[in-house]
Amino acid sequence: MIELKRLVGGYQREKPIINGVDLAIRKGEFFALLGPNGSGKTTLFKLVTGQLPVVEGEMLLSGRPLSTFTKLEKAKKIAVLTQEVQVSFDYTVEEIITLGRYPHQKGLLKNLTKKDKDIMKQVMDITGVTVHKNKQFHKLSGGEKQRVLLAKSLAQEPEILLLDEPTNHLDIKHTFHMLDLIKEWQHTKGLTVFAILHDLNVASLYADRLALLYNGRFLEVGDSDTLRKEEQLERVYDVLIKAGPHPVVPKPQLLMTPKLEVKNEVHGLDNLVFDMDERCVHVQSNKPLRTISNGVIGEGIQWYKHFCNFHVDKDYNCDHPQKDIREWLRQREIPTEQSVGMMTAVKLSDVVVSKKEIEGMEFMAVVTAGVGNAVDITKAELCKTPVTIGTINIILFIDAHLTDGGLVNAMMSATEAKVKALHDLKVQDMKTGTIATGTSTDAMVLAVTQQGEKTPYAGSGTLIGKGIGHLVYEGVTKAIQKYQKRIGQHI
C-alpha cells in the first residue's frame, strides 16, 4: 500500500534527518512508528504527508509515485490527524466534519448529499461528538477537539489514515476509545493506519507491526515482540526497561525504572511482625516484599506487605472466596491492595512457625496443614476426591534477591519439600490408598526481601534451595503431626 524506497529528506538539503529509509506498509495493517525525541519521527511523517520535500528516493502509493497524485486524489485516499488541534476559523463542530466530505462532493456548489449527511452522522456518533455538533470548535476541550478532528478524518472515508501522536490530548478512557475505534475501522473497512506513537505500551497493544527509528534510520521493523529487546530499547531511550507479558493479551508491556533506583531497604527478616488469633494468621512486613503466590487473592508475581491465612469452617460456602477475604481484610483494617490472602479449614492453633539461618541467609516459614482431603495427583483422573477438611498452606519468607525465574524455581523447591514430607509421613489419598502428593486445595506464597546479589537459581543445588527444602519439610512435617494429634484426640 505505502512504500518508501531509499528515502532521504529533512529541513536542510545538506544535512538530511532521514537517511535512506526503506519501508513497506501493507494494505489494511496498523503500523506504528516509534523512537525518542529527535530520532526523525515527525520529519518522516512530514515527508510522507508532503509537508517537506524529498531529497532522494521515492514514495509509492499502491505502486504509483505519490508525487503523481493530484491534491484531490490524495484527499480521497489519505486522511491526516496530527497532535495539533488548532483551526484557523471559528467553525462549528458540524462544519468542521463537513470538510471531510469535500473531496467526495461534486459540482460547483458542493452541496451535501444524503450519503454525505449519513456518513457525517455515523462518524459523529461513533466518536461521541454528536452532542457538540452545534458548538463552536474553539470552546471545546483539547480531547474533544481531537475527537472532532478524528470524525472529520473518518468522514473522508480514506484508505489510509496517517496519525501523528493523536492521543496526546486525551485521557486514558478516550485514548483507548479512539484507538479501539480506529482498530475497528481497520478490521471492518480495510483501513491502513500509519501512526507515530510515543507510548510504547499503547503501540504494543494496537500495532500489527512497528518500526524503531533512531538517528534517522530504522534499527528494526517487526511485530510487537521487537519491544521485548530490552537492551536495544535501553540504548535508544536511555532508560532502564523491563519487558513483561500483558496479563490478558499476548503482547509485551514495558516497565521503566529510574536509574537512581529507590532501594527496598528490608534488611533480614527482623522487620516481620507475626500476629494471630483463632480467625487469622497475619504476618506484616514494613516494606513490600517480592512475592509469588497462588493465594485466593494476591496471586501471581507481585509486591506485598501483608500475608494472611484465614480460618473457615469445614462447611464454608466457597462461592465467593475473593470477596469474602477482601471483606475480612477490611474488617481488620488491612489494605487489600497490599495483601496476599489464603484460607484453610485447619485450626490455626496447629500453625507451625519455623526460622532458620544458613550462612547468613535467613528463612522463615509459617505452615498450617490438614490432610483430610489429601490426594495423589497422579491418580486424580481415576476417581473424584471428596473435598473435606484439609489444605496445606505455606507462607515462606527469604532474605534473598531472586529474579522472576528464581521465584518460580523457589516454588518448585518448596513443592518438592512438601511432597517429601507427605511421603515420609505416609499420608495417603483415602480414595486410592496411594501416597498423597498434596491436598486438593493447597496454597503457597513465597516472599523475598530482594536484598543481596540477584540470582535466578533456587533449586536443590543451591544454598537457597536447600534452605527452602529444610524449612518447608520441617514445617509441613510438624504441622501435619499437630493436626493428626488433635484429630486423633478428638476422635
Image: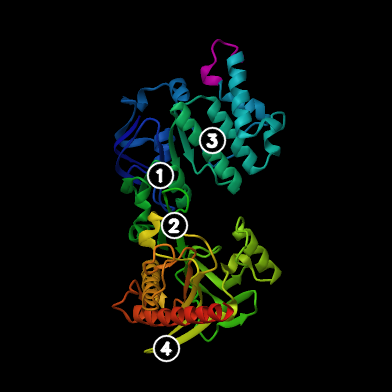
Distance from disc 1 to disc 4, alpha carbons, whole Å, reads 53 Å
242 or 220, which is in the foreground? 242
Most extreme residue toward the top, as rendered? 107
In this picture, residue 136 sits left or right of residue 405? right
**Tag 1 residue:** 33
Counting residues from the start of the chain, the first of labels 1 and 4 encountered is 1
Helix, strand or loop status at disc 2 = strand
Specify the label residue 254 is tagged with. Answer: 2
Label 1: which secondary element: strand
Q: Mark 4 points at which residue?
A: 357
- Relative to the observer, which residue lies in front, 152 or 312? 312
Q: N-terminal of the two: label 2 or label 3? A: 3
Q: What residue type is labelled 2?
A: Leu
**Residue extent of the magenta highlight:** 102-113
Of the two numbered discs 4 and 3 on the same chain, state the one appearing first in sequence.
3
**10 Å crowding of disc 4: few (<14), some (14-19), many (20+):** few
Residue 181: image tag? 3
Q: Position of residue 252 (x, y in %)?
A: 41, 53
Q: Does residue 464 appear anywhere in the picture? A: yes
Residue 475: in magenta span: no
Indicate the colouring scheme: rainbow
Placement of 380 over or under 465, stated as above or below = above
Question: Residue at (62%, 64%) from the top-left corner?
Answer: 325
